[in-house]
Amino acid sequence: MSSEAPASIHDRLSRVFAEAIARVSGLDPAAINPQVRPAGDPKFGDYQCNATMSLARQLGRNPRELATQIKAAADPLLAGAAEPLEVAGPGFLNVRLLPDFLSECLARIPPPPTAASDALDRLDLPRVARPQRVVVEYSQPNIAKQMHVGHLRSTIIGDVFARVLGLLGHDVIRQNHIGDWGTQFGMLIRWYREHPLPRFEADADVLESIEADYRAANERFASDEAFAREARAAVAELQGGDTEARRIWEQICAVSLQAIDETYRRLGVLLRPEDVRGESFYNSRLPAVIEDLRAALPARRPGEASGGWSEVRDDQGAVCVFLYQADGSPRFKGPTGEPLPVIIRKSDGGYLYATTDLAALRYRLHELEFRSGRGAERIIYVTDARQKLHFEMFFAVARDAGWIPPGARVDHVTFGSVLGPDRRPLKTRSGATIKLRDLLDEAESRAAALVAARERSGGDATMPSDEGDASRALSADERQQIASRVGVASIKYADLRNDRNADYLFDWDKMVSLQGNTAPYMMYAYARVRSIYRKAAERTDSADPYAPGGPVRITHPAERALALRLLRLGEHVEAVANDLLPHVLCGYLYDLAGDFMKFYESCPVLDAPDAATRLSRLRFCDLTARTLKLGLWLLGIEILERM
């Protein structure tokens, strides 16, 4: 198994075992899943091939005898890369990679881009063989309202997906489906016809004033029928292009979008104004959605279709899509068992979220222009779990209508809630929703206190120290930069390190800590590795650890463990892209920091026994720092060279 192939070790092992299984079974290698997994315990090796038992059942063979035959076919293919395979238990095949093979793989990782280059340091991670056109929809705030803690998870989780898929070479378009249309704007337009308009400047306080006006208008809408009637008329005027209504709407949108963009920049996410494609964009397409669904989903009876189906019907003045199983029973049911339809137009002629979402889905799959062509091949929606039923239903309608092409993948990525100390959704002490800017302010304040405490204590014992870096006091600008980056990173990492499907407890003391699986610890780990590398480099004369043919020696178990961990980065990045679980990458980076600590404690770098060993261990330091930096970047976290 060559060390030159630009693919992860996992992928290369999978190909080897697929070929070996094909040789002994006669099956097509392309149809074989060799079930290669990292070994759960190092005593069983580095990887395992777990396909033998299922394959033996399929072929009617004894699993251990089959495993022995696969071993005989695979061992020659793994020559020079692994020790002879071990058959364990009923037929598991254990793989232990050779140190020289790991050394060769590390040695082939190119040096980082030059300082003058703005290229991302990819560490030679392979790009996918067939890039896809991918839409990632995330964040989705509302115009005329401030972003709050409820927008946090969608924003930072979706950003990880956009970064990871882009790194792997997919053609990614980010979409921010903001709420910028509908009745709420009729309320505000009507309100501002009798109240003075705020000064529409890009300022969070102005947005707060608009939000207060919206609350007042909403109360008036509920209690004053004349106001409500005029607000509905204002919606029609806005949709019809009335100049005054349009001017007020555009001003409200402008100040809201500016405040939203400032929050994104502070959070360090990739979303930009050009990624905004709000509900208003699809307004002119909604009538066609109704007519096209009527044509695509004609009424049927049980037995007329081989599977389930949908049909469009007028029901009490509304236009609805009813979804049925093959036997004619409802595919979705209400609380009392009645058929639950997707309402696509209300009895008053208004449209709902489902109509807009259907228009957006069809637009993205068939019309949206990418660099590599037209129409998405994969769409990822990132919203909280409460919208699960809504997405299931409108996805089903789109599939029944034939709008989702064969082979296209549409994912609804959900997440749990952020909980406060009372284990209820996080709010202020008064019970109000926490504004995102207030949360970030608090994070920066706590990070600043952490920096000050660390300066007073003279460092931290959880990572190797470097007196040359630690002795120089931080400047005021450095303290501010550290507080800003650490504060934001603490919030993001504390969220991402948890399985997104679960609720998690928001705990300031744990997330802003230099110990444990936290952002401060990970950022400090990077800064410390860099400081070791800098100081060691000063003592290696002019030798370059990335000189052509520069050796990477693996002579100690801690070096071997660190080498294997470094080479598994690609597997974890691919896992995030496929399974959409960011915590997998967080766990990998934390384990990497731990493996480096064991390496540093066992394998002296500054006082290595000879120049060649020192250069090899310098390479380990540099590769660890670069891997941490890339991994944290994929999580949307900016590193610090000194902390």
Image (tube, helix red, strand yellow):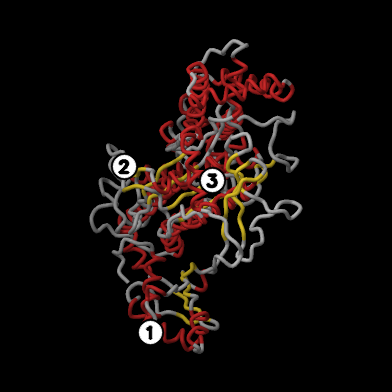
Q: Which numbered disc flags the more N-terminal residue, 1 or 3?
A: 1
Residue 382, numbered circle: 3
- The one nearer the camera, 12 or 101, is 12
Residue plotted at (66% across, 21% down): 217
Above or below for 149 versus 59 = above
Label 2 amino acid? Ala
**Image position of 275 with respect to 127: above or below:** above
Mark 3 lies on a secondary structure that is strand
Q: CA distance from mark 1 to mark 2?
A: 46 Å
Q: Looking at the picture, how far across and down is residue 379, in whole percent?
A: 46, 49
Q: Which residue shows up at 56% across the image and 31% down it?
A: 142
Q: Is residue 430 above or below residue 603?
A: above
Which quadrant of the view contains residue 574?
A: bottom left
Please state which amino acid type lies under the numbered disc 1: Gly
In the rendered structure, the answer to whether residue 161 lies left or right of residue 150 reads left
How far apart in space, not on screen, are marks 3 and 2 (Cα)? 28 Å
Locate residue 627, reporting x and y percent.
Answer: 41, 50
Quadrant that contains the N terminus? bottom left
Dot 2 lies on which element?
loop
Q: Residue 613: which disc?
A: none
Per the image, label 1 sits on a secondary structure element best described as loop
At 29% from the left and 60% from the top, the residue drawn is: 551
Q: Nearer the viewer, residue 530 or 240?
A: 240
Which residue carries the number 1 mark? 26
Q: Is residue 200 visible?
A: yes
Give the CA distance from mark 1 to mark 3: 43 Å
- Near mark 2 (Cα within 10 A), the count class, few <14, some 14-19 or many ≥20, is few
Residue 119, numbered circle? 2
Quarter occupied by residue 149: top right
Q: Quadrant of residue 189?
A: top right
The mark lying in front, picked from 1 and 2, is 1
Can you give x and y, in whole percent of width and height, for residue 571 in the image?
44, 59
